[in-house]
């Protein structure tokens, strides 16, 4: 039997319902991780936070996020998608809520570490659910829907957080604390919804009974294709996490946004990223339906996405806030189109029994890229430099990542894992 089931015998509507359900979880994850960047000015009124401290807080999240991305894959391979995702979501929701009781930087750092532990399992769970429910020619579109959740969460974040910060002062508790309490509660509600509605399709259960040989991380790393995807993710996610965690502060610092302005227009680039999620996966699936190979369909869409990223280098020279938002919107569109396709590459390379491990390695690489560029940004900004050098670096990283993929994976196809390599 093929390692990649070609036509799950499940109801068409049920398949796409799973995609939207998982997309909602990813939306909550991006809302949760955006709480600190968008509430930073309000938090600074109670807890002093420099640029370097902010970089450390971001890195605290990313280090455990990356490690648990790998650990989450291991957890899912053993617990299964339904139970594994339930545990992951409840854990990260409680970790998000714990920010609200922080009395200083150390408690905030502890909460960021715990949030990373929980959220690290989110995308491995999403990748596994897509592999369980969708055939190869529909996976990119399905992952596009799932990845669009990143945009939904990030779009909701600025106006929602601004609303809570200005309107919610319940029980004489600082409004920024309620930002974390409320978003944490939203995750717990989703966990209950997931437990009641999700189950693996019948044919996947039959496949799992065959008990395919386990593929170790060492066996994966003996393939240059795996290294190519991991390095590409390291490069491209370095840029993405910089945009994600520093765009709000850039608007506050460089363009003197207040909370009202941030809430009214700060969501625009994230909305563009949602369109990019659907376009990247949709283009790849369309090329497959036209009879093109998986290799061409993925790489053509990846190259088109990477070509949109260098425009960010013109942000420091933009003459107005409108142009700044327009350029960032193009970059966010390209990034999430790219991200959708990179997340689907593991399903093209390895069988389902190794998907959790490979998705974890890829996520770990991306998180470490975010740590490196984030730390560089914090250091430069606290030592008198502008945002220009970091934006120049970020603008080049996706093009470099595409070059790595083309060199490391000359032909995209399932990898051969003989008994000697597993």
Image: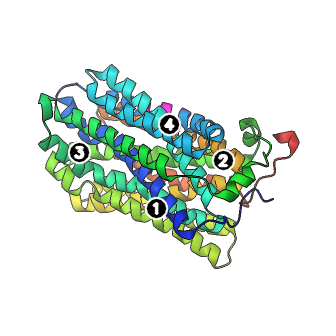
Of the numbered discs 3 and 1, the one sitting upstream in the chain is 3
Residue that badge 4 annotates: 87
Check the image and report above or below for 85 versus 336.
above
Magenta span = 60-67
Of the numbered discs 4 and 3, the one sitting upstream in the chain is 4
For the residues labelled 1 and 2, say whether their Cβ atoms are less than 8 Å apart: no
Q: Residues within 10 Å of mark 4 (few under 14, many from 20)?
A: some
Q: Nearer the viewer, residue 84 or 282?
A: 84
Residue 64 visible in this rendered orientation of the protein: yes
- Location of residue 53 in the rendering, given as x and y in whole percent from the top left corner: 33, 27
- Location of residue 394 in the rendering, given as x and y in whole percent from the top left corner: 44, 48
Residue that badge 2 annotates: 355
Q: Is residue 4 one of those drawn in magenta? A: no
- Find the distance from the CA under tag 2 to the CA under tag 4: 19 Å
Query: The C terminus lies in which quarter of the figure?
Result: top right
Q: State which quadrant residue 79 falls in.
A: top right
For the residues labelled 3 and 2, say whether their Cβ atoms are less than 8 Å apart: no
Residue that badge 1 annotates: 277
In the rendered view, does 218 fall on the left or right side of 241?
A: right
Residue that badge 3 annotates: 161
- Find the distance from the CA under tag 3 to the CA under tag 2: 35 Å
- Location of residue 247 in the rendering, given as x and y in whole percent from the top left corner: 31, 47
């Amino acid at each position: 039997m093929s390692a990649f089931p070609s036509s799950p015998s499940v109801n068409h509507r049920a398949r796409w319902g799973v995609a939207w359900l998982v997309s909602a979880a990813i939306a909550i994850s991006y809302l949760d991780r955006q709480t600190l960047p968008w509430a930073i000015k309000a938090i600074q009124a109670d807890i002093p936070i420099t640029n370097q401290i902010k970089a450390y807080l971001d890195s605290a999240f990313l280090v455990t996020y990356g490690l648990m991305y790998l650990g989450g894959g291991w957890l899912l391979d053993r617990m299964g998608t339904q139970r594994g995702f339930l545990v992951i979501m409840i854990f990260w929701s409680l970790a998000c809520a714990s920010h609200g009781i922080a009395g200083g930087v150390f408690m905030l750092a502890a909460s960021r570490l715990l949030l990373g532990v929980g959220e690290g399992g989110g995308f491995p769970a999403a990748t596994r659910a897509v592999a369980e429910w969708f055939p190869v020619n529909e996976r990119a579109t399905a992952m596009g829907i799932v990845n669009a959740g990143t945009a939904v969460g990030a779009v909701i974040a600025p106006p929602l957080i601004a609303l809570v910060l200005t309107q919610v002062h319940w029980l004489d508790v600082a409004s920024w604390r309620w930002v974390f309490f409320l978003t944490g509660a939203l995750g717990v509600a989703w966990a209950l919804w997931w437990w009641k509605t999700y189950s693996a399709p019948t044919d996947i259960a039959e496949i799992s009974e065959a008990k395919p040989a386990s593929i170790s991380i060492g066996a994966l790393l003996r393939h240059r294709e795996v290294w190519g995807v991991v390095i590409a993710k390291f490069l491209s996610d370095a840029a993405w996490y910089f945009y994600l965690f520093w765009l709000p502060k850039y608007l506050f610092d460089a363009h003197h946004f207040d909370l009202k302005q941030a809430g009214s227009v700060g969501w625009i680039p994230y909305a563009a990223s949602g369109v990019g999620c659907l376009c990247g996966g949709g283009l790849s699936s369309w090329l497959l339906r036209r009879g093109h190979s998986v290799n061409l369909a993925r790489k053509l869409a990846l190259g088109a996405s990477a070509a949109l990223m260098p425009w960010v280098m013109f942000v420091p020279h933009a003459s107005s806030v409108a142009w700044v938002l327009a350029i960032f919107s193009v970059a966010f569109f390209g990034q999430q189109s790219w991200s959708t396709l990179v997340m689907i590459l593991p399903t093209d390379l390895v069988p389902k029994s190794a998907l959790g491990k490979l998705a974890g390695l890829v996520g770990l690489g991306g998180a470490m890229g975010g740590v490196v560029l984030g730390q560089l940004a914090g250091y430069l900004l606290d030592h008198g430099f502008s945002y220009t050098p970091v934006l120049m670096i970020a603008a080049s990283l996706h093009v470099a990542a595409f070059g790595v993929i083309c060199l490391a994976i000359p032909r995209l196809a399932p990898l051969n894992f003989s008994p000697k390599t597993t």
